Image (cartoon, rainbow, N blue to C red):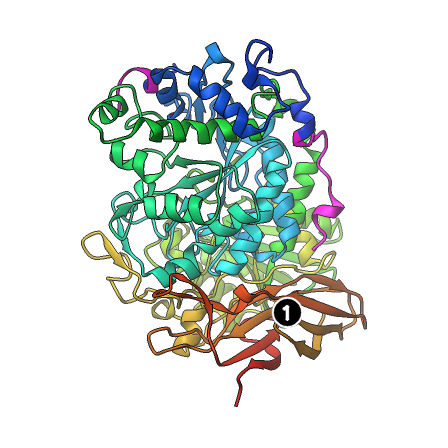
Amino acid sequence: MRMRVGRWLPAAGALAAALALTAVPVPGEARAQESRCGDPAQRPWCDPSLSPDRRADLLLPQMTADEKIAMLAADDLFGGPLGGFLETAHADVNNGVPRLGIPPVHMADGPAGVRQGKATALPAPIALAAGFDPEAARLYGRTVAWEARHRGNDVIFGPTVDVLRTPRNGRTFEGFGEDPYLASTLGAPWIRGAQSQGVMAAVKHMAVYTQETDRLTLNMKVDPRTLREIYLPPFEAAVKEGGAATVMCGFGRLNGRWACEDGTVLNDILRAEWGFEGYVASDHFAPKDTAAAADGGLDMELPIGLRYNAFMLKAAVAQGKVAPATVDGHVRNILRTMFRFGVFDRQAYPNDLTGADRTASETAARRIAEAGITLLKNDGVLPLKAPGSIALIGRAARQSPSGHGSAQVVPFTAVSAQDGIARRAGAGTRIAYADGDDRARAAALARDADVAIVFATDAQGEFFDKSCLTLECGEPLRGDQDGLISEVAKANPNTIVVLNTGGPVLTPWAGQVKGIVEAWYPGQEAGNALARVLFGDVDPGGRLPVTFPVDENDAPTSGNPAQYPGVNETVTFSEGVMVGYRHYDAKGIEPRFPFGHGLSYTTFRYSDLAASTGSVKVTVTNTGARTGIAVPQLYIGMPSPGADVPQPPRQLKGYTKITLRPGESRRVTFPLSQRSFAYWNESAKAWKVADGCYRIMVGSSSRDIAETASLGQCG
């Protein structure tokens, strides 16, 4: 059943270079296919030689008032968001205007892969973030969009670039972690990769979306500096550097203004300041008021026209609440974007993913998983060296954990950790398994093995935040996983813990085990990727995009209800810019594992740091006996221009990812710009560079600084 609600009534490193996706036309090739628009002699807006703006200007006057309104809302409630994982069900559909050759636009959820029927389940975006690799992000976006196109979609809802504020956030797995620079440098290439496939990316959720608790009604009190320095940069990069076709506004209120009605953000910042020329779409059912949404910058309402429909929007125009030019402007934004991405000038993408060759997608899933697997601790137990027997304990050894909600993907196939490890170990290694429910049995199994690997999971996803950071809070059906790990560690001195979590968890047993591997939600190639890392076929490439605390009360926003989860549905961001590792550094709290941390199977030395206002350079040398992956990171400690503008001890301003052979050295350059040294000056409403001393720090994590220098006025 399809509801045309809008027409009738208001109802309720080098990774990507090594891997090319198959059968992928560039956008120009897609446009060269037969047009759905019609004959340019009869419909001049169908002439592809004209600019998108000119074509929109020619088409818009031919539309009736009802047709314009119909373009401002999607139409498919029961086939879309209520259709679940049906192969034919898109997340949303706008049916277009056949009379004028305006084609339908089909949309899919996709921050972790296409949520439509079955698709390739990529590692969770937090695992991509752990890869610290913009080229991997480009590959990720390309892979998702290629499959979205083969599911007949024109738009993919992704990436999610919301900066992590509280580690209890149920959608931690769906984003790129706690640092705005990291999220910015991954979101933009993700978008470029996706849009290279002729699919429009919808970056989300602008402007501040930090928790699931009360998400539909929450009022977030955020000062201008915090907004500019922490939460807006990933969206700015998505627009200016990624060229995002679409921006999705989210739920809740920012300083009293509903996200999809916030003209300060959507009109003044997004369009006037950043130059965004795409269209703004709402998260499902997010708009509250017709006139406020229209005047506030919302172009398209999803999933149906509850506010944008032939009754309410017409009435708002008739009553003078919304100017006709405002409606025309929203329609023009949509049409111009469709013209820009060639939607008019090609046939509809066929829904044929089941029959498509997904080999490249599966390879991408494995390589991205390998690149994000993060070795947190290693007391010599890894890489595995042909053990005679391995005990695998925990249900996740036979499953592939994932987050739930709109980012959940149902894979065609999945390789479990048990299958991947058994295949890689070979017939000479005995593999035993216990689900861990019977702790005594698990300990006995571990005692008889050369190596014991315990798989521990949390559970997170859309709609609900985690009640705490222990493993038990996230997975109540798993029982006492912390106790299980301790018992296994007592039984076998060579115990390794593999964490399949969507974000930080407490690890009270960290001192009892020899190895800790954070594998995140690893996607359908979990077993193959993990086995290759555990056995040393590839170096663990991940670094933490989030901080792991020692204690629940150490984490940001802990112990202050006004900060989280809020009082009377209001959250006050009184921590300001002290988000993530900045919080730990500013308060002098020692984390269990710091932001940026991740071990290699070799060792590295940093030397010869040279700093200027245009770049920072450092030499990285592999001092070990194996080829390995280094992720040198640049942090800057900025001077405060005054007591009312506190600065964190350090901020990430650059990183790179390199592979070095034993003894090999490489000179690494981190480019810098004026923005690298700037803070948001609230009185000037502009980026400013303060006078004073800038501390330059390069190392392997936010807490492991190897080389330092100074710039500016340093006494």
Helix, strand or loop under label 1: loop
Q: Magenta stretch: dominant SS?
A: loop
Q: Is residue 282 left or right of residue 435?
A: left
Magenta residues, as a range?
A: 6-27
Residue at position x 38%, y 58% in the image: 227
Q: Position of residue 481 (x, y in %)?
A: 44, 58
Q: Is residue 426 left or right of residue 611?
A: right
Question: Where does label 1 land, which residue?
Answer: 614
Count the marks: how many? Answer: 1
> In the image, what residue type sits under mark 1?
Gly
Q: Position of residue 289 (x, y in %)?
A: 24, 34
Considering only vertical position in the picture, is 673 above or below 220?
Answer: below
As for residue 449 lying within the magenta part, the answer is no
Residue 690 or residue 213, whichever sits in front: 690
As for residue 21 lying within the magenta part, the answer is yes
Which quarter of the image is occupied by the N terminus?
top left
Dot 1: few (<14), some (14–19), or many (≥20) neighbours within 10 Å?
Answer: few
